[in-house]
């Protein structure tokens, strides 16, 4: 089936199989920031935005994004770089495998929550797992980035 | 991984139901998070996108929730935050993460009657009805008691009352399945205590609920009702906890639930 969508502000037409998952489609078109690390929809590494909402690209059929606007971290270079610098300054990036999905969630949170508390930040990001950092550095980086205490 | 040979987008409910029942392995697609974990070989995957089943609205004294509404929409909708002390948003907030809840649907969550379900437990302590395309409208309790039949869950109807309610769950770690979950509600002097993830599906503790209606609500009475709930319901063992552990948890969570509701102000 052919789908038409906007990917990082560029209109594209892609042929996809009926049971193809979006993470695989995106990676096959060179969007390699999108990672897959679990089979159970619980690590958040594949997080992208669909019409501005953060979603798990590993769990969404590609046919379902026909007509939609997809954003991956490749489409947000400035915002991603700004936050990634703070993240590494806080020692919150080690292997970095979780970073693209994590940054997409943080940027989505910035758009959705106004002056979030620490509890709200932690809760919003429960769906992004990181095997290396222990999360405290990430929390410091987010607070610095959002300018919240 | 599941496979889908054909993908269809029916224009109306009758067409969707017809396709669903045409062949055994024709299947409705919700958010696909659960389907994805299985190996089902689907002949026709039925995508309900064109049926506009994504809404939460007030109608005829009910709050009506369309089957394709996401758990995140349910969690953030003002109508559900304002009613029943926000029990529905509270019940789903610990399910994996925001990006997961943006994708999975209310219809699939209820239709599948998962034993571990947080949402079913919370909805069962409200006046919830399930509307199936073929089976029609029935109470959630009746729906849960029926054998699983092929049908299409269209929407849920929750009577708009000043019912006070609370939801509690116990998880070994954030975003894991609940070891046990409890919902308690009260309308006038009528109490409903529901316990789920036992690990079998949620059920009402009728005896304990009735005990609370009989006399003044003292701490002793609350403790007796919590004890009764843990005795009248059955519990099982799985990797998350033993039956004995769940029974003990039930007593504690039910007691807390009753105390929370007793302290609630009506909204
Ligand atoms: C890893 C993981 C962890 C989870 N943890 C929890 C948890 O802690 N608590 C909790 O409550 N839930 C949990 N869930 C369940 C989740 O919240 C959803 O209920 C579940 O994923 C089904 O939603 P879906 O939209 O993905 O359905 P799908 O996977 O698309 O469908 C599931 C089933 O429902 C059928 N179906 C879909 N829509 C309809 C309809 N309208 N009418 C009839 N049948 C329909 C499908 O044919 C399929 O058989 C978890 C799920 C996963 C994958
Ligand atoms: S790959 Fe783990 S949630 Fe998508
Ligand atoms: S930095 Fe290695 S998984 Fe997060």
Image (tube, rainbow, N blue to C red):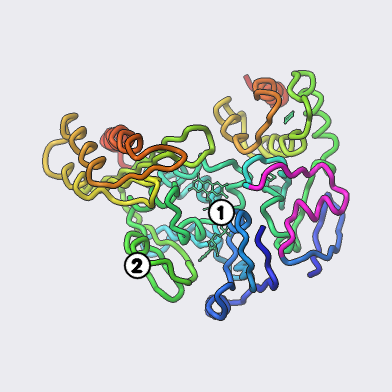
Q: Point out residue A19 in the picture as x, y percentages from the top left corner.
A: 71, 63
Q: Which mark is residue B8?
A: none
Q: Residue at x 44, y 60 (%)?
A: B64
Q: Residue at x 74, y 34 (%)?
A: A98
Q: CA distance from mark 2 to mark 1?
A: 22 Å
Which residue is label 2 attached to?
B138
Q: Is residue B28 magenta?
A: no
| Dominant secondary-structure state across the stretch colored magenta | loop
Q: Which residues are magenta?
A: A19-39
Q: Position of residue B87 (x, y in %)?
A: 40, 44
Residue A69 shown left or right of residue B147 in the figure = right
Q: Answer yes or no: do the residues labelled 2 and 1 have beta carbons within 8 Å? A: no
Tell whether B30 sits left or right of B172: right
Please give the residue where the numbered disc 1 appears in the rendered image: B70
User: Which residue occupies the extreme left position in the image?
Assistant: B215
Q: Residue B242, how many percent across, how many down? A: 38, 38
Q: Secondary structure at mark 2?
A: strand
């Amino acid at each position: 089936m052919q789908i038409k969508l906007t990917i990082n502000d560029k209109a594209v037409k892609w042929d996809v199989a009926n049971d193809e998952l979006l993470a695989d489609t995106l990676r096959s078109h060179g969007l390699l920031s999108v990672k897959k690390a679990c089979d159970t929809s619980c690590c958040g590494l594949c997080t992208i935005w669909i019409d501005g909402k953060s979603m798990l690209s590993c769990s969404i059929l590609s046919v379902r994004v026909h007509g939609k606007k997809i954003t991956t971290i490749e489409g947000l270079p400035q915002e991603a770089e700004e936050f990634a610098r703070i993240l590494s300054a806080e020692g919150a990036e080690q292997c970095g495998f979780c970073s693209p999905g994590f940054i997409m969630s943080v940027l989505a949170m910035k758009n959705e929550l106004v002056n979030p508390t620490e509890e709200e930040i932690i809760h919003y990001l429960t769906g992004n797992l990181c095997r290396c950092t222990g999360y405290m550095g990430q929390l410091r980086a987010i607070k610095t980035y959002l300018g919240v205490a | 991984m599941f496979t889908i040979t054909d993908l269809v987008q029916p224009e109306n409910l009758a067409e969707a139901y017809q396709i669903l029942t045409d062949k055994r392995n024709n299947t409705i697609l919700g958010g696909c998070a659960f389907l994805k974990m299985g190996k089902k070989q689907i002949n026709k995957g039925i995508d309900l996108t064109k049926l506009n089943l994504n809404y939460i609205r007030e109608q005829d004294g009910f709050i009506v929730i369309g089957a394709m509404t996401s758990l995140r929409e349910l969690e953030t909708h003002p109508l559900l935050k304002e009613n029943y002390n926000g029990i529905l948003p509270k019940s789903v907030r610990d399910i994996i993460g925001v990006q997961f809840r943006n994708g999975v649907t209310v219809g699939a969550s209820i239709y599948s009657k998962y034993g571990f379900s947080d949402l079913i437990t919370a909805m069962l302590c409200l006046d919830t009805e399930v509307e199936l395309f073929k089976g029609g409208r029935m109470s959630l309790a009746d729906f849960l008691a029926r054998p699983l039949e092929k049908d299409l869950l269209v929407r849920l109807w929750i009577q708009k009352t000043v019912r006070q309610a609370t939801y509690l769950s116990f998880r070994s770690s954030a975003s894991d399945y609940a070891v046990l979950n409890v919902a308690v509600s009260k309308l006038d002097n009528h109490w409903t205590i529901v316990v789920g993830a036992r690990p079998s599906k949620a059920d009402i503790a009728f005896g304990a609920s009735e005990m609370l209606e009989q006399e003044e609500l003292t701490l002793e009475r609350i403790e007796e009702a919590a004890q009764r709930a843990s005795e009248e319901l059955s519990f099982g063992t799985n990797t998350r906890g033993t039956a004995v552990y769940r029974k003990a948890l039930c007593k504690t969570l039910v007691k807390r639930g009753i105390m929370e509701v007793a302290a609630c102000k009506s909204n």
